[in-house]
């Protein structure tokens, strides 16, 4: 069966094993005579899927018992609003560290709800690196500190995270969750749209420290209140059942791979292939991110001029590569190498890059 050399930034590649398993169940899931997307979300068959997804998330990420795991719709973009609506008090400030376009968008939504402060930013350096920040500049009274752990557009990634026991830390991990081991206790809220490493678009995972739920006002609309999801096992309304089913299959796949330590090793190996192709090209390829901020999920680069970049993308498309164009806001080239992108696909891309350089 033909499978594209898929380097899309999101929705992104899913494991082939997962797609094959899902294909078997589209018409008849668990001998119900119905596809998974046809089942009632109140049925025992779907409940088992729902609970399995939560159980595997807790296992793979080692999520402590004092955290809730929520399944919410609306993508990470809805969380840009839900976080300040639930956590930002009237007389408090929300602090944001800007490392790319998505953190800018998160800040923009929070500005509509309450007072915000930019604690650090690398915008003046074209977001080539994770910005330096001074923890002492963030007061203990801050409602929370928000970061974006991986920046898909610019190809940068946090390697270590801020630490302040008195300031809750919220992180958008949409593009690198499940790609490496994580100390969940470092964070008070983690959220991630599924369409990179977790599954298809349609479901967003929110991991929130239970004590933070006390901040949510009863005056909030039900579907914008974290307690609505926490108190109803994310089944207050009809959840995205098919997306959660595929999420559970992806988590099973990750577990069989040996968990996050093995997945991290595979991701580092894939990233090294492409960064070596850039670094050994004698300036033919120009990496966007500083070396100490490079992402293992999104490898961003340019060629020496726009004409050459267009030729590269054209030849890559002819060779069967998909999704190598940079984000429309900045152009250039980008290879997204999430968990499900096979190693041999990355090997082919690295070889193509070297051959294209030799021919030009």
Image (cartoon, rainbow, N blue to C red):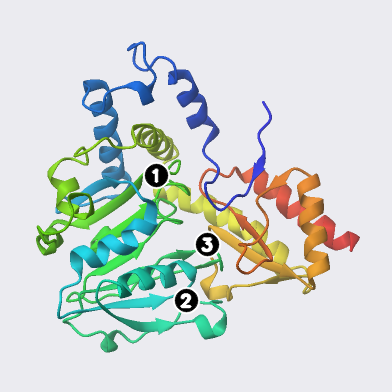
Secondary structure at numbered mark 2? loop
Q: Nearer the observer, disc 3 or disc 1?
A: 3
Residue 48 in which image quadrant: top left
Towards the viewer: 279 or 199: 199
Up-down relation of residue 136 to residue 357 (above or below): below
Chain-order first, disc 2 or disc 1: 2
Q: Residue at x 17, y 50 (%)?
A: 222
Q: Residue at x 22, y 56 (%)?
A: 208
Q: Residues within 10 Å of mark 1 (few under 14, many from 20)?
A: many
Residue 176 can be seen, yes or no: yes
Q: Nearer the observer, disc 2 or disc 1?
A: 2
CA separation in Å, label 2 and label 1: 27 Å
Q: Where the C terminus falls, by quadrant?
A: bottom right
Q: Nearer the observer, disc 3 or disc 2?
A: 3
Up-down relation of residue 321 to residue 172 (above or below): above
> How far across and how far down the image is residue 189, in percent?
26, 61
Q: State left or right for residue 226 relative to residue 195.
A: left
Q: Residue at x 38, y 72 (%)?
A: 108
Q: Residues within 10 Å of mark 3 (few under 14, many from 20)?
A: many
Q: State left or right for residue 71 relative to residue 314.
A: left
> Badge 1 is on which residue?
259
Chain-order first, disc 3 or disc 2: 2
CA separation in Å, label 3 and label 2: 13 Å
> How far across and how far down the image is residue 78, in percent?
34, 57
Disc sitting over residue 130 in the figure:
2
Secondary structure at numbered mark 1? loop
Residue 181 can be seen, yes or no: no
Secondary structure at numbered mark 3? loop
Total labels: the figure holds 3
> Badge 3 is on which residue?
152
> How far across and how far down the image is residue 331, in percent?
67, 66
Chain-order first, disc 3 or disc 1: 3
């Amino acid at each position: 069966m033909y499978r594209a050399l898929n380097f899309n930034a999101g929705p992104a590649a899913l494991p082939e094993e997962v797609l094959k398993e899902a294909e078997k169940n589209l018409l008849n899931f668990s001998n119900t005579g119905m596809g998974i997307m046809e089942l009632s979300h109140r049925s025992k068959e779907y409940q088992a899927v729902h609970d399995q997804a939560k159980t595997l998330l807790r296992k793979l990420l080692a999520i402590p018992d004092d955290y809730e795991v929520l399944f919410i719709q609306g993508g990470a973009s809805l969380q840009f609003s839900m976080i300040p609506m639930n956590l930002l008090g009237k007389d408090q400030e929300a602090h944001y560290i800007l490392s790319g376009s998505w953190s800018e968008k998160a800040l923009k939504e929070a500005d509509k709800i309450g007072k915000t402060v930019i604690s650090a930013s690398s915008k003046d350096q074209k977001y080539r690196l994770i910005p330096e920040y001074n923890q002492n500049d963030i007061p203990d009274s801050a409602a929370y500190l928000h970061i974006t752990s991986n920046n898909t557009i610019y190809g940068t990634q946090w390697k270590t995270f801020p630490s302040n026991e008195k300031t809750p830390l919220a992180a958008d991990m949409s593009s690198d969750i499940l790609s490496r081991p994580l100390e969940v206790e470092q964070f008070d809220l983690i959220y991630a749209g599924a369409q990179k490493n977790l599954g298809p678009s349609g479901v967003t995972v929110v991991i929130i420290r239970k004590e933070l739920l006390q901040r949510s006002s009863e005056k909030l609309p039900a579907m914008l209140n974290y307690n609505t999801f926490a108190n109803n096992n994310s089944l207050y309304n009809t959840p995205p059942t098919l997306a959660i089913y595929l999420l559970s299959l992806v988590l099973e796949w990750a577990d069989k791979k040996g968990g996050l330590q093995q997945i991290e090793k595979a991701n580092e190996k894939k990233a090294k292939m492409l960064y070596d192709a850039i670094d050994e090209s004698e300036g033919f390829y120009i990496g966007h991110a500083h070396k100490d901020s490079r992402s293992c999920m999104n490898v961003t680069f340019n060629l020496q001029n726009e004409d050459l970049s267009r030729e590269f993308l054209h030849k890559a498309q002819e060779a069967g590569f998909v999704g190598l164009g940079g984000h429309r806001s900045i152009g250039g080239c980008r290879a997204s190498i999430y968990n499900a992108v096979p190693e041999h696909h990355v090997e082919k891309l690295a070889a193509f890059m070297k051959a294209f350089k030799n021919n030009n």
